[in-house]
């Protein structure tokens, strides 16, 4: 009788171990040669998913208000799409990369507070801008619709200093053709797209220069200067005044060099 009870206990332990290991077993990794697509869902996570997508912004610039930030740190967007490139989705390992870009002029240029230099020194006033997704991207081979928000990063500004939000994003409509912006901006033209195909990996690569100078940018929010370590003062107004925000459509511009790789989900997760 005792042996039966012991055997039953072993079975229960084994079943518990299997149950504990199940989630790890379900988390699939991309096959060798497709690791750049990590963050693309599997069809188990999204039954309608067809193609995995990995886009990289390799250069260009982003001008918003009177601030023009060069893109020197590559920005990636990884996920997957359904038929006809619709329904972009991604896992916790995908989406847009955390890729800070150095903002010329630093915090002083952003706020106009020259006295900060005496208190903190120039190194402490270096400012970075990180682009974050604020909605769902939509793409074709020659256009990318990208709702974003820009996180302004420096300890002086607090941790929640943003231009744009999930409820009020900056919506970029990037194209490789010629724009039709409202004045005072004039039309600008991208280039491409060029398409190549690797028959061994069956990865398609699309390259182009994507442009938009028709988008609007809202004012800053959440920017807080804390004096003496405990007195918080909102400086949204200072940031907006020094940066020319909010900036109406026709006064902003971005040019982005983008390379996009596409592979069938069943190649990424065979």
Image (cartoon, helix red, strand yellow):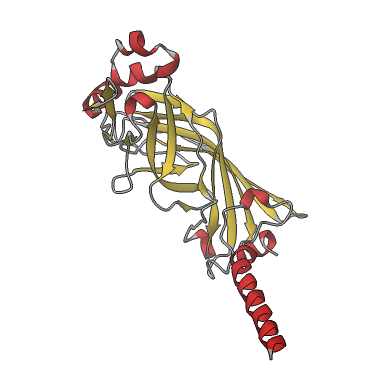
Q: Is residue 188 visible?
A: no
Q: Quadrant of residue 128?
A: top left
For the point 62% across and 52% down, the residue is 37
Tell me the quadrant of the picture where the N terminus can be found: bottom right
- Give above or below for 18 relative to 239: below
Residue 232 position in % (x across, y down): 24, 28
Q: Residue furthest right?
A: 200
Asked whether 58 or 188 is in front, the reply is: 58
Q: Quadrant of residue 187?
A: top left
Q: Is residue 59 visible?
A: yes
For the point 33% across and 27% down, the residue is 157
Residue 175 position in % (x across, y down): 46, 43
- 53 left or right, relative to 171: right
Q: Residue furthest bottom?
A: 1
Asked whether 95 or 193 is in front, the reply is: 95
Residue 86 position in % (x across, y down): 48, 61
Q: How many numbered marks appear?
A: 0
For the point 66% across and 52% down, the residue is 204
Asked whether 35 or 265 is in front, the reply is: 35
For the point 58% across and 68% down, the residue is 43
- Give above or below for 110 relative to 222: above
- 215 left or right, relative to 22: left
Q: Residue furthest front?
A: 2
Tell me the quadrant of the picture where the C terminus can be found: bottom right
């Amino acid at each position: 009788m005792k042996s039966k009870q012991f055997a039953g206990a072993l079975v229960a332990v084994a079943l518990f171990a299997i149950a504990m290991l199940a989630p790890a077993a379900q988390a699939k990794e991309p096959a060798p040669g497709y690791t750049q697509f990590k963050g693309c869902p599997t069809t188990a996570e999204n039954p309608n998913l067809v193609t995995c997508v990995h886009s990289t912004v390799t250069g260009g610039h982003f001008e918003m208000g009177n601030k023009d930030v060069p893109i020197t740190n590559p920005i990636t967007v990884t996920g997957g799409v359904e038929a006809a490139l619709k329904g972009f989705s991604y896992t916790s390992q995908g989406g847009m990369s955390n890729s800070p870009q150095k903002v010329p002029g630093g915090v002083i240029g952003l706020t106009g507070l020259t006295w900060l230099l005496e208190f903190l020194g120039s190194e402490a006033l270096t400012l970075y801008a990180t682009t974050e997704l604020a909605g769902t991207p939509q793409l074709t081979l020659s256009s990318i619709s990208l709702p974003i928000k820009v996180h302004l990063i420096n300890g002086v500004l607090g941790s929640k200093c943003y231009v744009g939000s999930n409820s009020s994003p900056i919506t970029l409509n990037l194209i490789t053709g010629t724009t039709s912006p409202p004045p005072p901006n004039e039309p600008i033209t991208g280039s491409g797209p060029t398409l190549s195909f690797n028959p061994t990996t069956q990865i398609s690569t699309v390259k182009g220069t994507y442009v938009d100078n028709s988008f609007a940018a809202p004012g800053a929010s959440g920017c807080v200067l804390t004096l003496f370590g405990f007195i918080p003062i909102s400086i949204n107004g200072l940031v907006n005044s020094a940066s020319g925000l909010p900036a109406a459509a026709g006064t902003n511009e971005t040019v982005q060099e983008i390379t996009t790789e596409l592979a069938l989900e069943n190649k990424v997760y065979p």
